[in-house]
Image (cartoon, rainbow, N blue to C red):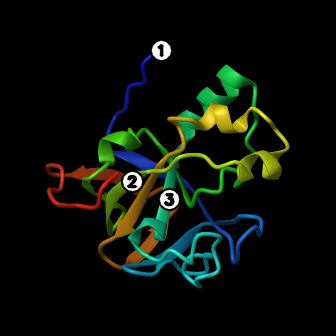
Amino acid sequence: MPRSYAMPGRLVSIYIAPEAKAPMQSRESVRAVPGRGLEGDRYWSGTGAFSRWPGPLREVTLIAREALAEAASEFGVAVQAGEHRRNLVTEGVDLRALLKRRFRVGDVEMEGVRVCAPCKYLVRVTGQDRIFDALVRRGGLRARILTAGTLHVGDTIQARGEPVRGSLPP
């Protein structure tokens, strides 16, 4: 069944992990800084699993609550809080529509730079063999932070204008 989205959407959860493989920690708010990411997160400190390849593809990741619900419904997988390894959980937003577009989460402007595919690490974290397949095409979005600010659970999410030309490749 096709999803319908009523933009603006909203930010329903925030997660950070202080280092690679550490459990994700829920936050009510977090500071976002261009070129760094989310304060306290593994990629902010350069200790994330993929930090050896620096760049804007590691600043922040988003996943839709609806995608997690679809994965649970279709594949029988249950993703507990933070097990998805994404920083921001959204509701009411078609994240693929934000690819190569500027958008705002509260007062923080971002740009969707790449689809965020699931990784096999999720199988180890969750103990569910089907989690990888369940999140294919539902893994979310990588974004770079364009303006500094603080993200808060409950912030609205709104696309801003036309797709960005000359942005990073998906």
| Classed neighbour count for the residue bearing mark 2: other residues with Cα under 10 Å, few (<14), some (14–19), many (≥20) | many
Residue bearing mark 2: 114
Q: What residue is shown at x 32% (from left), y 48% (from top)? A: 99
- Residue 24 coordinates in the image, percent (x, y): 71, 64
* Numbered-mark total: 3
Residue 108 falls left or right of residue 129: left
Tell me which amino acid carries mark 2: Arg
Q: What residue is shown at x 26% (from left), y 50% (from top)? A: 159
Residue bearing mark 1: 1
Earlier-in-chain disc, 1 versus 3: 1
Earlier-in-chain disc, 3 versus 2: 3
Q: From what the image shows, is residue 66 above or below residue 85? A: above
Tell me which amino acid carries mark 3: Thr
Which mark lies nearer to you, 3 or 2? 2
151 or 124: nearer the viewer:
124
Labelled pair 3, 2 in contact (Cβ < 8 Å)? no
Residue bearing mark 3: 61
Earlier-in-chain disc, 2 versus 1: 1
Residue 41 falls left or right of residue 59: right
**SS for dot 1:** loop
- Residue 127 coordinates in the image, percent (x, y): 85, 43
